[in-house]
């Protein structure tokens, strides 16, 4: 099987793959996959969180995709991010970038008036995370909104981000926070940031959001397991219905004929999205 699936709750891992030169992909030759969930968190600095690759700390252009997804785009070619811009939204893994507000009216959390968070990421990852956060952190349900960082009325700014995840392809932002170093940093490995207020750092609501994102955010799985029997997870990212549909099929491959038959049936019956 030559497909790799981006799957929520996946442990990741596996081998590093390379996008083939015959794939007509915009990033042919780039490495992707193999990163596991233990390295999911970056910092407050855009371009952080890359577990491997010959990384130029002055830009994110040309980097691999350790989790199978592309970095966020902030406009104005900040740290070389224009190559992941909206002109490629049609082929961006998980769909175009969106933002979703995270707030709660649940009395479980004694939150302050300034605790209005947003998640930023591809449509499918963000939508799945909203579902998980509603369940686990009592977040009020909300629909994703197309994210255009260059719009004058954009709600979420680069300065609002308090945490990047998944090689800077997903972020948690706080509207009341302003990181004055965010836009002007020329080093993606910099730890120089405006301190996050203690009321946020020690907030139980914030902790819940961060914990669930770290545990559940969709990442590329490790691929099929070698051997006679393999468990295959086929993730179908719904376009019309904004949820992740996951079917788990255990297939025993005892002969070459069986393997070819299974492949033919899967190809014909399932419409799955390939990553990255």
Image (spheres, helix red, strand yellow):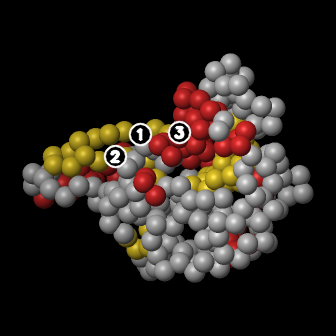
Compare residues 240 and 120 and report the one nearer the observer: 120
Q: Is residue 79 above or below residue 169?
A: below
Pick out the residue farthest to the left: 254
- Give the labeled residue for mark 2: 233
For the N terminus, the image quarter is bottom left
Answer yes or no: do the residues labelled 2 and 1 have beta carbons within 8 Å?
yes
Residue at image x 56%, y 47%? 125
> From where the camera sits, is residue 46 visible?
no
Q: Position of residue 92 (x, y in %)?
A: 59, 61
Q: SS class of the residue under badge 3?
A: helix
Disc marking residue 212: 3
Q: Nearer the viewer, mark 3 or mark 1?
A: 3
Q: Residue at x 40, y 56 (%)?
A: 36
Residue 163 in the figure: left or right of residue 150:
left
Q: Who comes first in sequence, dot 3 or dot 1?
A: 3
Q: Which mark is residue 158?
A: none
Query: Taking 191 as reference, is 147 above or below it?
Result: above
Residue at label 1? 246
Mark toward the start of the polypeptide (2 vs 1): 2
Distance from Cα at disc 2 to Cα at disc 3: 21 Å
Total number of numbered discs in the rendering: 3
Q: Secondary structure at mark 2?
A: strand
Q: Quadrant of residue 31?
A: bottom left
Confirm or deny contact between disc 3 and disc 1 (CB under 8 A). Answer: no
Q: Nearer the viewer, residue 62 or 174?
A: 174
Q: Residue furthest front?
A: 198
Residue at 60% in and 78% down = 57
């Amino acid at each position: 099987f030559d497909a790799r699936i981006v799957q929520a709750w996946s442990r990741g891992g596996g081998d590093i793959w390379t996008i083939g030169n015959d794939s007509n992909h915009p990033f042919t030759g780039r490495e992707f996959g193999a990163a596991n969930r233990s390295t999911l968190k970056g910092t407050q600095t855009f371009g952080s969180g890359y577990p491997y690759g010959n990384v130029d700390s002055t830009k994110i252009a040309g980097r691999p995709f350790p989790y199978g997804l592309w970095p966020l785009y902030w406009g104005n070619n900040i740290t070389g991010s224009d190559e992941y811009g909206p002109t490629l939204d049609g082929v961006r893994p998980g769909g175009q970038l969106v933002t979703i507000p995270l707030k709660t009216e649940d009395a479980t959390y004694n939150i302050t008036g300034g605790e209005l968070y947003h998640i930023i990421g591809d449509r499918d990852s963000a939508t799945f995370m909203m579902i998980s956060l509603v369940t686990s952190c009592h977040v009020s349900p909300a629909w994703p909104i197309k994210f255009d960082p260059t719009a004058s009325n954009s709600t979420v700014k680069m300065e609002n981000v308090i945490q990047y995840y998944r090689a800077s392809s997903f972020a948690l932002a706080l509207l009341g926070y302003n990181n004055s170093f965010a836009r002007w940093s020329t080093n993606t490995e910099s730890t120089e940031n405006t301190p996050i207020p203690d009321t946020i750092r020690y907030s139980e609501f914030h902790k819940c959001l961060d914990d669930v994102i770290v545990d559940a955010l969709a990442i590329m799985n490790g691929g099929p397991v070698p051997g006679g029997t393999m468990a295959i997870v086929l993730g179908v990212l719904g376009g019309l219905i904004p949820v992740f549909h996951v079917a788990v099929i255990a297939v025993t491959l005892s002969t070459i004929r069986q393997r070819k038959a299974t492949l033919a049936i899967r190809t014909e019956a399932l419409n799955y999205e390939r990553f990255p």
